[in-house]
Image (cartoon, coloured by chain):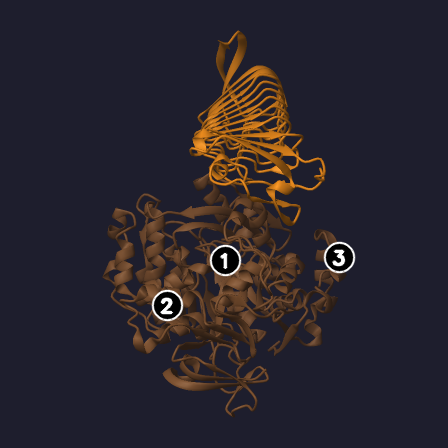
Chain colours: A orange, B brown
Amino acid sequence: MRRVTLILRDDVDPYLPIEAEAISPEIFSKKIDVSVYVGNERKRITDVFDIRVDGEAAGPSATEIVIVGDCHQVKRVGEYMTNGKIIVEGNVGMHCGDFMAGGTIEIEGNAGDWLGREMLGGSIICHGNAGNYCGSGYRGGRKGVRGGEIFVAGNVGDYCAECLFGGLVHVKGNAGIHAGSNMKGGKLLIEGDCLMPCGDMFAGEATVYGHVTDFLPTFKETGTNIEDGHHLTVFHGDVAHRNAKGTLRVGSFDRI
Amino acid sequence: MDYIINNAYVVDPINKISGEIRDIFVSNGRITDEEPKGAEVIDAGGCLTLPGGIDSHTHICGTKVNFGRYMSPEDMRAGRAPRRKGMRAVSGYSIPTTYGNSYRYALMGYTTLTEGAMAPLEARHTHEEFKHTPLQDGLILTLFDGDWGVMRAVASGDIKRAAALIAWRLDAVKGYGVKLTNPLGAEMWSWGKNVECIRKPIPDFDLSPAEYIKGVIEANEMLGLPHSVHLHCNNLGKPGNYTCTIGTMGLVPDLNEKRQTCYLTHVQFHSYGGTSWKDFCSKSEPVANMVNLRPQITIDMGQVMFGRTTTMTADGPMEFNLYRLHQDKWSNHDVELETASGVIPVIYRRKNLVNSIMWSIGLELALQVKNPWQCLLTTDNPNGAPFVKYPEIIGLLMSKEYRDREFATVHPKTGSRVILPSLDRELTFDEIAVMTRAGQARALGLIERGKGHLGPGAEADIAIYPIKPEKIDPSKQYAEIIRGFAQTKYTMKLGVMISKDDQVLADNQNRTFWCSPQVPKEYDMSKDPDLIRTFDRYYTIRMENYPVEEDYYLTKSMKIETETML
């Protein structure tokens, strides 16, 4: 078991983005001395982090990466990871867990925008808030997250789970506007409130326990049910789309 | 810089040179007979040497293309290349950045591009994009399919007035030729309808598409424009539309000795049989026969190739129908009194029967039109496929074996709906040279401007491909043909080496050709009270602000003044 601890150095400029797609168990199980882009300059990772390595590597699955410090500007952590574990003790920047296919990312602080974009598998647990486009697809793309689980204990920004195609996105708090828009499969669960969700939904299941503001008129009411102690109204849609097969359950709503 | 190109295997159909090993002399940007002194010597090593490629119908600049770009940010994930020495960073596949278009065309040996459709009101945008397409000369066809002034003039039988209006607008927007996209379709689309029969007059104007097409063809010839009317027929993409296409071809008189009288574009999309998508089939045979019988017509293929692309056209109702079929992203626009447009991304799949038939039809047209000067190679980029697929199309046309191999991979029912497997013709290098440059030069009236050939005095637009025609059998070695046409060894434009292998070497070589018909005073529409009133009442912009400023928008303006018969 190898445990790599990265401690953000104090002299790092918090306003310069750091492109750190090299921080992933695949790469760290082989070598630690990788390079990252700081702004437009290529630098060694040791210029950004103090690194401590414990134990010997036995493949990505036996590699754990711990990131310490407020890394809100560190982008693309865990991109394409397939195995192993990343623990972020502070905040993390944009595009954390893009395309990940396996393994676990646990974020104790807040995550930036595009958390788990186009993820294929594995799980992301965020104990703080997540930014916009949490669990979404690429802008304009047709298939977003295809598998895996994203859990956010706090709130998420706009366009959460856009183009969701498979897997589960679970938000404990509130979501912004257009959660689950263009959904084509998978499950979205928002325990708090949200605004105008699931526009142009093709398929999949979305549930909002709280209140929906500006509920779209293109959903057809089909009944009610009780889930986990919440009384929900069940809708079918988005009927603006031909052959829509989506299900949307909401606690309460006011129409647009 | 002067050049001597030694040992070139020259195919130059306009000068009737069919594969001779020759030396080419380039001096001051032109081809000469005399050997220049102090010139750089390039050894072509027996490689295929053609005049610079000309695309007679492509969509690379303008508001439609740009709308495609911002509708499909995901397209920019493909085709990314970082900045290199002398080259900017580029991205995009079916609708790349302007530099992406320019570099890729240059590497394929193309030096002249024709934007197939520009809404006159959006002219400034189109010229600005051409300004940033650095390695090719640009011609812009201007849309007149729903121009109220021209429609009224033709309806009242006043062809001279129609010609004068066309002349004023071409001069104002710096356009090269007249494009009709689904004639009168844009006007019907304003009412949520489309043109179904070319003989049926549309309401309010009492004018049928057939009358309009004939009137505009006559007006076009009166103005002495270098290019003929460039026509996208009615009913594009509808099963059974071949009758409409043949009917339209029947309208075309023979009025010009030098070139065709009407250019029908992307005819693949207009050669459909059947009554619905269920019994959809190829009707390329009657369409090709009609072309064979009428030398006054030139067509281009509009070949469909499998893969992802973006469709964009001024044919608004057609794009709406396509949207209803695909249920994906979609946009439609209306351009005031002039035209309309629509853009949607599509994916053509081998597993899809309709797409497989479309793929066959384009090839069938090229193989059945006997005279290659009458059928030019295009994909209607990016509607049928991005232009980077041209080499594959050349491979398909030159090799029956390759066609059969590809045919085995398409939808299994395709064989009962098309005639492609029965066509044995394999095109030669001469015919490919006609279909990719010489034919275009003739169709666009560019031969007099020194394009499309390698005779003395011609502009030194030269493409040297890494193909040795004497040592290759295209019908068997189609893979080498495709690779060879995909990237030249050298591309030269007006005597400047613009690319070598995969490296672009030049910048700012582009010029814009446009036509200014010289009309007599009584036909000068800039003082016409009717036109001024139309602008005051209906346009969102004042007439004096409408013309594109030559100095500001066209960096290298090539004005062509034509003599008119008004």
Residue A208 visible here: yes
> What x and y, as percent, mark residue B414?
28, 50
For the residue pair A96 and B432, the one nearer the viewer reads as A96
B286 w.r.t. A29: above or below = below
Q: Earlier in the sequence, mark 3 or mark 1?
A: 1
Q: Earlier in the sequence, mark 2 or mark 3?
A: 2
B259 w.r.t. A240: above or below = below
- At 62% from the left and 27% from the top, the residue drawn is A130
Q: Mark 3: which secondary structure?
A: loop
Q: Residues within 10 Å of mark 1 (few under 14, many from 20)?
A: many
Q: Residues within 10 Å of mark 2 (few under 14, many from 20)?
A: many
C-alpha separation, residue under disc 2 versus residue under disc 3: 43 Å
Q: Earlier in the sequence, mark 2 or mark 1?
A: 1
The disc labelled 1 sits on which kind of residue?
Answer: Pro
> What x and y, as percent, mark residue B536?
75, 55
Q: Mark 2: which secondary structure?
A: helix
Query: Residue beneath label 2, please?
Result: B291
C-alpha separation, residue under disc 3 versus residue under disc 1: 29 Å
What chain does badge 1 belong to? B
Query: Residue beneath label 3, please?
Result: B542
- Contact (CB < 8 A) between labels 2 and 1? no
Q: Which mark is residue B209?
A: 1
What chain does badge 3 belong to? B
Instruction: Nearest to the eye among marks 3 and 1: give it.
Output: 3
- At 42% from the left and 34% from the top, the residue drawn is A59
